[in-house]
Image: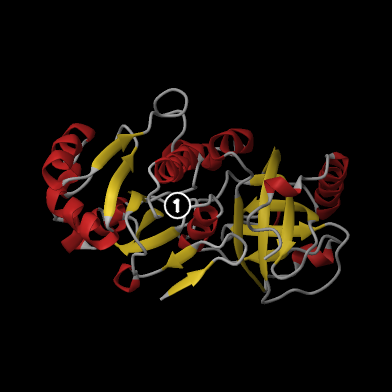
Amino acid sequence: MSDYNRESGVRVTRDVEEFKPLGDSVLTIGRFDGVHRGHVDLVRAVIRAADVDHIESSIVVVLWPPPEWILRPSESRALLTTLEDRLNLLSELGVSDVVVLPFDKELSEQEPEEFIRFLKARFLMRKFVTGPNAAIGRNRSGTTSTLARIAERVGFDHVTVPPRGMTGEISSSRARQAFEDGDIVSVKNILGRLHSLEGPVVHGEARGRCLGFPTANLELPEWMVLPLDGVYAASAVIQGEGLVYRALVSVGTRPTFGSGDRMFEVNLIDFDREIYGRRLRVFLQKRIRGQESFEDTEELVAAMRGDEQFVRSMQPVKESDLVPFAFR
């Protein structure tokens, strides 16, 4: 089924079998984890190519689940973004279509030319846009030089977009590593925006409320990349509301109270409503300090008050840093 992103007017199709082409297309394909600045350059190149040659459709095809989950499940790494976040972020860039292509073992075994012929037939592809490190088809054997030869045989134009910055400087893997290291500034530089995580608020042990700092415990996918344990300044938005709240985020096992499960806890400053079951999106802005084990709760509360004052002293977050998620 296809639906339209109301804000952007983009057609989003979550199953390629239900996609109906509206005319010839310029197309790119990938995993798009994080939808970083390099991905944005790639998508904008698709839009430009369609405009210059008066081609009806500009299409981004998203592989899901990620190929590594199918091909190397024991080595699968955590991810920055859910499928829905990828679709929302890509929709905001102005293409005509974003389409999900289910990735499975059968698809992985297609030779590059077979896969390209599928794309050409399914999407009426006239131009195929890739980055310089493209690797299409079985064993990732469809490199840029291979694609150039296939383009001549199959009948389409292949366009290669140069990398942004130094090779490897802007990449999903680099963004994931920076996030795991707690380097929020580098993550923003790579993505071109504040990174955010979203999930439902679930019941916890209510320790924060007893200390005067009630927290919303966020339930996140097991495969989601979390930042380095510590305390972070953040902004947060409750789904369906138009307000942005200053927030403190604690990531870790709460060593002051003994070891436990790793938690992602959010204290919304100047907020006193219960929001269990509501979805909360949190935009991390800065790492304040590492996780610490305090001698007693009084020492912990004093540190938390200092963290709160730090957040209050920060400049309010810009709405432009929160789109496209903030007010949905």
Task: Give 240 or 50, whichever is nearer the viewer.
Answer: 50
Q: Which residue is mark 1?
A: 79
Please give the name of the residue rendered at 19% of the width and 58% of the height, measured from the top-left corner.
Answer: 118
> Is residue 243 left or right of 9 when viewed as pictured?
right
**Quadrant of the rendered structure where residue 62 is?**
bottom left
Please give the name of the residue rendered at 71% of the width and 46% of the height, measured from the top-left corner.
Answer: 320
Say what secondary structure mark 1 lies in: loop
Q: Position of residue 200 (x, y in %)?
A: 62, 70
Question: What kind of residue is marked 1?
Answer: Leu
Label 1, residues with CA under 10 Å away: few <14, some 14-19, many ≥20: some
Question: What quarter of the picture does the C terminus occupy?
Answer: bottom right
Q: Position of residue 17 (x, y in %)?
A: 29, 72
Question: What quarter of the picture does the N terminus occupy?
Answer: bottom left
Task: Give 237 or 75, whichever is nearer the viewer.
Answer: 237
> Is residue 156 left or right of 270 when viewed as pictured?
left
- Which residue extends farthest top? 166
> Is residue 58 left or right of 102 when viewed as pictured?
right
On screen, 286 above or below 282?
above
